[in-house]
Image: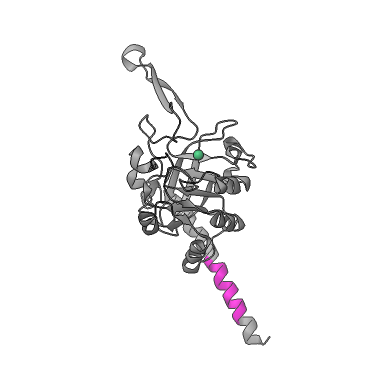
Amino acid sequence: MGALGRSSIFAVCFALLIALLSQNTHHDSMLEGVPSGKTRVLDLSYAINDKLVPWPGDEKFFEAKVNATVEKNGYFTRSFWMLEHYGTHLDAPAHFPPGKATVDQIPVKQLFGPAVVIDVRAESGKDADYQLGATRVEDWEKRHGRIPEGAIVLLRTGWASRWPDTRKYRNQDEKGKMHFPGFSAEAAKLLIERKVSGLGCDTLSIDHGASSDYKVHRLALGAGLFQLENLADMNELPETGAFLVVAPIKLEGGSGGPVRVFALLP
Ligand SMILES: [Zn+2]
């Protein structure tokens, strides 16, 4: 290898290092820009009430009771009861075997990461049973670069526009089978190889609605990833460049639970 070869390799390495460093400074300044309003934050969680779309079969999903009122007690408190998997929620690895960690045991650093948004609104609009293939993930990488370790990969299907209409959102056929898009097992395997921290979607489940074996759940949760389901409208999210802060309830021993998901926009 000649001197020219070595120096150009050095130049490429140097450029990569600068790119990496500026990416970090970029994310730092994004956080600093939140209080001043310079950085816009999208809240990807739905407010919790008794009118959200529950998984079929659950009869009771949410209840809130007033315990004290300002008029009677001088202060206001309520108690509430809800399913762990209701509304915008996180699936902890323990939700499906062979996953182990409960929601309180997910390492904190896993809950922060760059958002990779895979936009399949067009495909989902044509085919409610659409499953994201591995080649579609590779297409994203051709345009934006390799998915970084620690990324949180969001599938934008456009299903949020059907929320909270239970009939449209579940899209059940006459046999009760649901039809909405999701990740395929092949895509999940590739993303696990990329060492991403979590998967998310704007539907009831990471697996497509008609799935009966929950392959993606078993693969992803088994590999220690978390899953975000029923994420709110992601239309404003860019395919790359946003940063996610995922804040689930710290419920000891929980299979999952309600989660607040914030997207910091570039
Ligand atoms: Zn769930």
Whether residue 208 is in magenta: the answer is no
What is the x, y in percent for residue 56? 44, 35
The answer to whether residue 62 is left or right of residue 112 is left
Residue 164 appears in view: no
Q: Position of residue 66 (x, y in %)?
A: 38, 18
On the picture, is 103 further left or further right than 46? right
What coloring was used for the rendering? Answer: one colour
Q: Residue sitting at 58 percent across and 77 percent down?
A: 11
Where is residue 108, by image quadrant?
top right
Main structural element of the magenta stretch: helix, strand or loop? helix
Residue most extreme to the front: 175
Location of residue 199 in the rendering, given as x and y in whole percent from the top left corner? 51, 49
Magenta extent: 8-19
Considering the image in quadrants, where does the C terminus appear? bottom left
Q: Residue at x 50, y 32 (%)?
A: 84
Q: Extreme right residue here? A: 1
Q: Quadrant of the N terminus?
A: bottom right
Task: Indicate left or right for 227 with 45 as reference.
Answer: right
